[in-house]
Amino acid sequence: MIKKLICVASIGLLFSSCDLEKYPLDAVSPETFFNTANDLQLYTNSFYNMLPDAEGVYNEDVDNIIKTSLSDEMRGSRIVPTEGGGWDWGDLRNINFYLENSVKCEDEAARVRYDALARFFRAYFYFNKVKRFGDVPWYDQVIGDQDTELLQQPRTPRAEVFTHMMEDINYAIDNLPSDKAINEVTRWTALALKARMCLFEGTFRKYHTEFNLPDANLYLQEAADAAETLMNESGYTIYSTGNPDSDYLKFFASHNAIETEVILARDYDDGLQVYHNFNYYTMTASYGRPGLEKRLVNSYLMRDGSRFTDQPGYETMFFTDEVKNRDPRLSQTIRTPGYTRIGETETLVQEFGATTTGYQLIKFVTEPAYDTYDKDINDMPIFRYAEVLLNYAEAKAELGTLTQADLDKSVKLIRDRVGMPNINMAEANANPDPYLELQYPHVSGNNKGVILEIRRERRIELLIENFRWDDMMRWKEGATFTQQFKGMYFPGLGNYDLDADGEIDICLYEGERPTVEGSSVEYLQLNSDIMLENGTSGCIVVNPQIDKEWDENKDYLYPIPITERNLNHNLTQNPGWDDGLDF
């Protein structure tokens, strides 16, 4: 796994703490530790546990992936928690504890390197906190249980916190090694994080004018510059073997992360018995039967670059027709006619017992040998080059400085992998996609059309890589979550051939179950196994009985837990969240 953390598992508990007051390492005394490069490496290895595991990468359930249940965020039913709620500071205390004690090491080169790693992770830690809560207390020192003033510190303004984060990430960029290392944070990882966090902050400040945050363009420029430095100096490329109909699928199914494109990955390994659960996640009902949402499927372009939603009758097109001649990433993301498992020859159709919408996931799916519970071993990308290219293009577009040449050296490289035409900036701006305009109503200005196209590209390319929630938050588009989630279209009851091979695959019925010839027919009872928007016809509707709400005044930030505010009366609550406290 990352940094082979399995090798230091025996000391893992020493590196955990729950709050700011606890001494972080009961068995590690600063008087006897932090003296050698090995000490610094051993301690900083623990910071990698802050990165997401596989489920933290693939298990998104915003408006891309629809399941049988909805999160509190999607329902608009979040409440102020009594405790927890993401307001945890143990990782930060461990980082600051390290930075206060690493000076004891006389090996200056080692100290600078591992200090840079610690500051990368402090920037990463605060990035997650700022995204979630906005203003948060800035701490760059260890706090003891008698440090009353610091323990009662109010929330530091977001703009000030981000200034400190920039100092940390710039130090990391300047002092981390430039050698590529897929399981270690390097200079390139730090540049990728800087591009990610600056794009988030720049667009958040641009679209969330209610917070009156300055310097949106400054951070957009920082994002573009960090991405461009990585593009010009790192040597990373988009993986391609010249097979547009399989390269995207094989990239994510590869057991070992492909180092030409993946900047940092979490390692899964049969030999080390470190596994994840993606195959099982997509092929059973145990995890909510995940499936792509209809509006996302509609957003995939035609193979020639034209818009699917410009075609007459696209709303009532049956599955076998709607997936023809589309962006090849569609057939490498969901089961489409002719689909076979990797290493197999039997063609398979989607299984409605494993997908709510009929659009069953295959991105990240590996060979059948890994289908059982918790046995999958393909590495999970945390930073990859395609995201950097998309960050570059979006930052430039939002700044108003994007050129066709910028698209040619960013988005074009991603589309080349699957044989898709590049975005034509002039055409996109002259004729913005009305379908995307409905999804992103806050986009305006001369670059409206190309911004919408970059968002299309980002949603499709980075699907189930845990970006969608953050993207919708920074773009201020949470209200679109209240729309009814939908799946495949069925013109009525009856029998359906899902792969046009002449055999019936689905029998959609109501009342008593009929008998249909064929051993592999899947029977779906109307209003029991499946619901259609027009009663006996239309698109599948998922969770129509669940009301969804979105409050523009509060839902872009999470609330501060009640216990924390009771302990520290200087912590103000986020706007719109009523916790019953008045002080």
Image: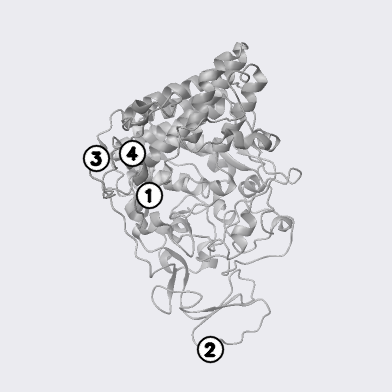
**Residue at the image point whose x is 55% and y is 50% from the top:** 58
Position of residue 577 relative to residue 91, above or below, is: below
Q: Position of residue 446 (x, y in %)?
A: 30, 38
Q: Counting other residues with Cα less than 10 Å from the Cα at mark 4, is it few (<14), some (14-19), or many (20 or more)?
A: many
Image side of residue 79 versus residue 235, left or right: left
Distance of label 4 from label 1 (alpha carbons): 44 Å
Distance of label 1 from label 2 (alpha carbons): 49 Å
Q: Is residue 377 visible?
A: yes
Looking at the image, is mark 3 or mark 2 nearer the viewer?
3
Q: Amino acid at mark 2?
A: Glu
Q: Which residue is mark 4?
A: 447
User: SS class of the residue under badge 4?
Assistant: loop
Q: Amino acid at mark 1?
A: Thr
Q: Amino acid at mark 3?
A: Glu
User: SS class of the residue under badge 3?
Assistant: helix
Q: Which residue is mark 1?
A: 82
Q: Counting other residues with Cα less than 10 Å from the Cα at mark 2, is it few (<14), some (14-19), or many (20 or more)?
A: few
The quarter of the picture where residue 561 lies is top left
Distance of label 3 from label 2 (alpha carbons): 56 Å
User: SS class of the residue under badge 1?
Assistant: loop
Instruction: Return the mark for residue 210.
Output: 3
Q: Position of residue 346 (x, y in %)?
A: 72, 65
Looking at the image, is mark 1 or mark 2 nearer the viewer?
1
